[in-house]
Image: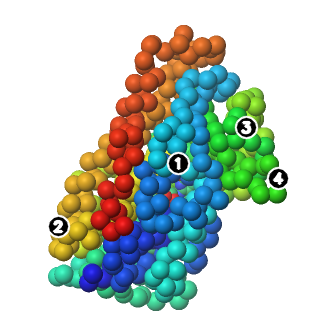
Amino acid sequence: MTHQIIISGAGIAGLTAALALHAHGFDRIVILERAHDIQPLGSGINLLPHAVRELDALDILDDLIPLCIQTKELFYMNHRGDRIWHEVRGTDAGYRWPQLSIHRGWLQNQLYQKVVSLLGANAVRTGMEVVNVQSSGRRAIAICKKRSTGETVNFEGDLVIGADGIRSSVRRVIVPAEGPPPCNGMVIFRGATWGSSFLTGRSMIIAGDGVRKIVLYPMAHRTDSDQVLLNWAAAVPENPGAGYSHGDWNIPVAPSKFAPEFEGWNLAGVQPSVLMQNSPDTFVYPMVDREPLKSWSKNGNIVLIGDAAHAMYPVGSNGATQSIIDASAIAYYLGRYPRLIDALSAYEADRQVKMTKLQLANRQQGPEVVINIANERAPNGFDDPENVFKPGELQEISDRYTKTSSMEFSKVNEPSPYMCMVM
Ligand SMILES: Cc1cc2nc3c(=O)[nH]c(=O)nc-3n(C[C@H](O)[C@H](O)[C@H](O)COP(=O)(O)OP(=O)(O)OC[C@H]3O[C@@H](n4cnc5c(N)ncnc54)[C@H](O)[C@@H]3O)c2cc1C
């Protein structure tokens, strides 16, 4: 293949795109990453079976399995631990591929190692911040600031893929006047700590009281004991005047600032406030997303994937999941259509409407809306959700989101639509 491809951002989308492009025969790929080196940053993320299918097709799943937990079930609860709804997940539910709970930084590192092994260490240029992209004729130029020296360095290619996250510089070239990502008034505190497992040891809990919410799951096993690495993320209304930077994933904050809000909560024997106090590193992230765009490309040689294209609220495990699927999709269409313009059009036609629906569904809290409904109807708790919800109501909410996130068994249990031509 002849296209020379520049990717801005060595996060989950950018690294997966490099692997998928390589699988489709592209080898002239450079990834530009702002960070000085690839460090295991972040906390837990969940990958749904249709993203895991893509990782399997890229031959990286076996490397990830020892690092993660294969999620078995998901409970929605109120803050007292009363059970609203239960879903079996991943292979236990009948999918051909598992749902993975994994540390974001460990996933990123595995993707990075694989990229280096296939494309060489020089394929990933760290400390290179893309500040602009110019499109001249059939070429696109990523203009970078080398962070160690401040000098400007240009990388020229046939295509620039913007995989540079929610504060993407490449997106700014497509939507110059957009400004910072909007916040819905909530902030998410997050962290992880080693501790005892709960329920099946592969269970996920999403619980709330109508104002605050917490997501809790194990994301790794210890090999020398039965402890698990417990990931938690807690959403609370933002304190007016707190002034946290929007879209920055690395703002440290002391647990004393938020753990007391969860005092007294008990979720299947887990006390979130204790977990929070025990977590060595805790961070805050304002709940931001991006407005859906009508187009993710410009001039036939600049295109967006992942959060740069469609950052959404972290609801329903779709952030990293959909970024991985985008990466597979763009590589597939670039391999299929000789003309870039045709490839980008096919990619957008496939992905853009689906992602807009998800972004909007997540603004309405996706399937997690059951927590708010339970709180409105039974603020003091309940013994049986059947006394709170109409027959079939919970199933209907769950089915609707399954469809919006393209998780129907009939679709997911087929081989990857993006890899089948090359495998
Ligand atoms: C440090 C960090 C920690 C995170 N922690 C969590 C978490 O705990 N839980 C969670 O749900 N999600 C987290 N996320 C977000 C999550 O990874 C994404 O929502 C999802 O995986 C989509 O991935 P992405 O590749 O599109 O974006 P990201 O994972 O955000 O990756 C974008 C990459 O582009 C790089 N970049 C940004 N701007 C430029 C630029 N101008 N030039 C070159 N490179 C650039 C970034 O350094 C990053 O490596 C985190 C993201 C980051 C960057």
Name the mark on residue 198. Answer: 3
Q: Is residue 79 left or right of residue 270?
A: left
The local crowd at label 4, few if under 14, some if 14 to 19, many if 20 or more residues have their Cα within 10 Å, is: few
Coloured how?
rainbow
In the image, what residue type sits under mark 2? Asp
Mark closer to the observer (2, 1):
1
Task: Indicate the quadrant containing the N terminus: top left, top right, bottom left or bottom right.
Answer: bottom left
Q: CA distance from mark 2 to mark 1?
A: 33 Å
Q: Is mark 3 within 8 Å of ligand 1?
A: no
Q: Residue at x 42, y 50 (%)?
A: 50
Disc 4 residue: CB within 8 Å of ligand 1:
no
In this orientation, does residue 242 appear? no
Q: Report x, y in % for residue 210.
A: 56, 27
SS for dot 3: loop
Indicate the quadrant containing the C terminus: top left, top right, bottom left or bottom right: bottom left
Q: Residue at x 61, y 23 (%)?
A: 83
Kind of residue at disc 1: Pro
In front here: 308 or 151? Answer: 308
Q: Quadrant of residue 232?
A: top right
Residue bearing the label numbered 4: 225
**Precedes in sequence: disc 3 or disc 2:** 3
Where's residue 264, x and y in %?
A: 75, 28
- Closer to the chain start, of discs 1 and 3, is 1
The answer, for residue 62, to whether it is visible in the render is yes
Question: What's under tag 3, amino acid-wise?
Answer: Phe
Q: Residue at x 33, y 77 (%)?
A: 25
Q: Are marks 4 and 1 in contact (CB under 8 Å)?
A: no
Q: Which residue is mark 2?
A: 342
Q: Position of residue 206 (x, y in %)?
A: 59, 35
Question: Which badge, 3 or 4, comes first in the chain's sequence?
Answer: 3
Instruction: Give the spatial CA distance, label 3 vs label 2.
Output: 50 Å
Label at residue 98: 1
